[in-house]
């Protein structure tokens, strides 16, 4: 379920607790004061000032997290995964959460405005914050900008470890994100909801992408077939057969895993034929 005001308040408390173990007492004192000022301020000055000072006051070290913290995060917001957040990124998310006073339109406009002028580390924080920000439906356009970003860490701040795309993207936006991940060489395994949101249109797009790569003599990520095999049509099955016939061992293994998730008789026959043909090593790194 997308984050709402109650979840946002609980997320703010968790972030504050995690930062308390990650920064010195003096820095924590500054953060407490900044959070109070932002929560009480009428305009944007206190927030903008605090966001700018966060790295200087708190540093950029990784947030110290323990396994129970991840469980608590998921209990607050299904799919929320703060792994890899730095202290200053966590502070920026917390400060924005503190700035929400019930007006979703104002909050979403604030996030959008900040993103338009943000540097990379700020953008990463704001896009990762979409997991717990209130007014998620008003932030779809801003999330779309992350998908279109040419900066890989910014794209991955939204695409990886983030429940927002899984829950809030329509099929076209979702498909665009998955294809973009492959195009820039970003892993698919950290995209939440990858299996549950696979669809025939995406499979068709990925088969087209694979053929373009093959025609150019370039390798195809084995991860691609995870989104094709379970919903493969005749053309998709033909592409998978090509992989099983002439792909590397890693590619053939990925194709078989994908086909096992397809209950159709054609897919199962293809899988059976592959098993009968054995697993002899193939020196090719990609289908030819």
Image (cartoon, rainbow, N blue to C red):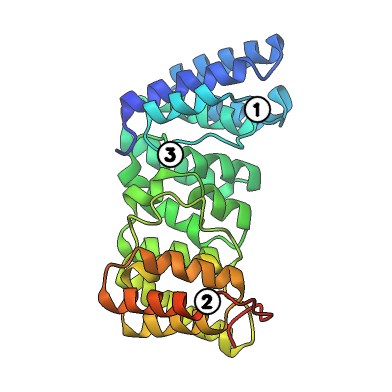
Q: Secondary structure at mark 3?
A: loop
Crowding around mark 3 (Cα neighbors within 10 Å: few <14, some 14 to 19, many 20+) is many
Distance between the alpha carbons at the discs numbered 2 and 3: 45 Å
Query: Image height check: is 88 above or below 119?
Result: above
Name the residue carrying label 1: 54
Residue 22 in the figure: left or right of residue 111: right
Name the residue carrying label 3: 131
Q: Which quarter of the rendering shows the C terminus? A: bottom right
Q: Secondary structure at mark 2?
A: loop
Query: Image height check: is 268 above or below 159?
Result: below
Q: Are marks 3 and 1 in contact (CB under 8 Å)?
A: no
Which one is closest to the eye, mark 3 or mark 1?
3
Checking the image for residue 153, the label placed there is none
Residue drawn 53% across the image and 46% down it: 115
Query: Image height check: is 26 above or below 132?
Result: above
Numbered marks: total:
3
Residue 107, x across and y down, in percent: 39, 35
- Compare residues 57 and 247 and report the one nearer the observer: 247
Crowding around mark 2 (Cα neighbors within 10 Å: few <14, some 14 to 19, many 20+) is few
Name the residue carrying label 2: 278
């Amino acid at each position: 379920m997308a984050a709402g005001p109650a979840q946002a308040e609980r997320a703010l408390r968790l972030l504050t607790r995690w930062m308390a173990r990650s920064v010195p007492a003096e820095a924590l004192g500054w953060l407490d004061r900044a959070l109070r000022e932002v929560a009480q301020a009428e305009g944007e000055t206190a927030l903008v000032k605090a966001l700018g000072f966060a790295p200087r006051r708190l540093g950029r070290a990784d947030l110290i997290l323990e396994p129970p913290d991840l469980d608590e995060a998921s209990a607050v917001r299904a799919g929320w995964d703060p792994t890899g957040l730095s202290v200053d990124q966590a502070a920026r998310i917390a400060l924005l959460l503190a700035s929400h006073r019930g007006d979703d339109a104002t909050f979403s406009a604030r996030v959008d405005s900040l993103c338009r002028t943000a540097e990379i580390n700020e953008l990463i924080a704001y896009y990762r914050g979409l997991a717990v920000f209130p007014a998620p439906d008003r932030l779809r356009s801003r999330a779309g900008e992350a998908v279109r970003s040419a900066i890989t860490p910014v794209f991955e701040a939204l695409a990886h470890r983030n429940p927002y795309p899984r829950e809030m993207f329509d099929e076209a936006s979702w498909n665009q994100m998955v294809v973009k991940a492959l195009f820039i060489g970003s892993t698919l395994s950290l995209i939440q909801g990858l299996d549950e949101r696979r669809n025939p249109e995406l499979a068709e797009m990925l088969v087209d992408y694979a053929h373009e790569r093959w025609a150019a003599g370039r390798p195809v990520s084995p991860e691609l077939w995870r989104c094709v095999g379970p919903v493969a049509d005749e053309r998709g099955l033909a592409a998978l057969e090509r992989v099983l016939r002439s792909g590397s061992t890693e590619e053939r293994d990925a194709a078989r895993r994908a086909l096992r998730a397809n209950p159709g008789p054609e897919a199962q026959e293809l899988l059976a034929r592959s098993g009968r043909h054995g697993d002899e090593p193939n020196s090719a790194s990609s289908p030819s």
